[in-house]
Amino acid sequence: MKAIFLCLILFIPFVANGEEEQKGEERKIEMPPLHHIVKVKPPEGMQVPKKFPLNDRGEIDCKTCHGIKDIATTPVDQVDKKADNFHRGGPYKALSDFCHHCHKKKGYERPNIHKLLDDKGEIDEKDCEYCHKEAPDLKKEIKRDELEFRLPPQKLCFGCHLKTPHLNALNHQVKPDKKMRQHMRAAEKKLKIILPLDEDGKVMCATCHAPHQLGVIDKNKPAGRQVADTDLDKGVSYVEHPWGRVFQLDKKARLDVLAEQDGTVHTLSYQRIKTEVLLRLSAKDGSLCQACHEFDK
């Protein structure tokens, strides 16, 4: 099969010429975005498993990754992408599990940029520059307006995290009214923390979440105070709660209707926070919520 490839990055879209002809012209098959490049030899040092066959020239080809028969000559829209063997050895819970057959997992893992301290408690200033234009001098008193970021603070987190990483994340990204702002200032003063807002005075991720590993900023400073009852490798964890059964029954009717509409069975589970990290105050005991909200007793 004759092919033309645009080698821009490791995972790229490309257009291949199909075998079928329409009125003397070859029908072009456009592959989906993020498709792996083919017709290339694996780099030196990469061990491709025997169950992933290369072509006669020792190159990565359609059959290397896909176990579906005649996939190279099958129109893209007719390929069963849900077949177990669409990716050889599948199905896979995550596509990265398939990729790691050839690519070493450690070398391709996204670093946890919040993990800023090494085993000796030292900071590599290069890590600071994921978010900061220049690593701040932590030995000096720094005002917020002196900090220069690569992006506006309210957008920085979206480089790695979803806009909706948890329930009500988007709902919170609003400007607090005057009464709530006064309540927040009182909480900051009383609890010796900071609850920073974005340049428009709206709540952002860093209002509730501390972006720096515990100990990076002096714990006695408001910006350095945070809740961290676990390490960053383990992260936030949850535990099942007896209320879960009530929660599921309450949502059952609506989920059944949704399942009829899209054919997908959805399962919800009510859980309580077990361990937490990178929070300015504890969420599991309600302290974080009460720093902004007032509840009737």
Image (cartoon, helix red, strand yellow):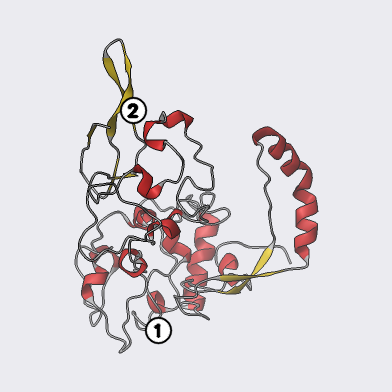
Q: Relative to 215, does residue 77 appear above or below in the rendering?
A: above
Mark 1 and mark 2 residues within 8 Å of each other at the beta carbon? no
Instruction: Say which quarter of the image contains residue 167.
Output: bottom right
Check residue 29 in the rendering and tell me which mark sits there, or answer none.
Answer: 2
Q: With 52 as the anchor, is 272 left or right in this view?
A: right
Q: Residues within 10 Å of mark 2 (few under 14, many from 20)?
A: some
Residue 138 position, x and y percent, is 25, 79
Amino acid type at circle 1 is Lys
Q: Nearer the viewer, residue 134 or 86?
A: 86
Label 1 to label 2, Cα distance in Å? 58 Å
In which quadrant will I find the N terminus? top left
Q: Nearer the viewer, residue 73 or 280?
A: 73
Q: Relative to 232, does residue 131 appear above or below in the rendering?
A: above
Q: Residue furthest bottom?
A: 120
Reading the chain from its start, which is encountered first: label 1 or label 2? 2
Check residue 17 in the rendering and tell me which mark sits there, or answer none.
Answer: none
Q: Nearer the viewer, residue 60 or 125?
A: 60
Residue in the image at 22% along x and 52% along y: 41
Amino acid type at circle 2 is Ile
Residue 125 position, x and y percent, is 22, 75
Residue in the image at 40% along x and 84% along y: 219
Q: Residue furthest front?
A: 56
In which quadrant will I find the C terminus? bottom right
Residue 127 position, x and y percent, is 26, 71
Residue, disc 1? 219
Residue in the image at 46% along x and 77% along y: 226
Q: With 201 as the anchor, is 146 left or right in this view?
A: left
Residue 171 position, x and y percent, is 54, 49
Secondary structure beneath dot 1 equals loop
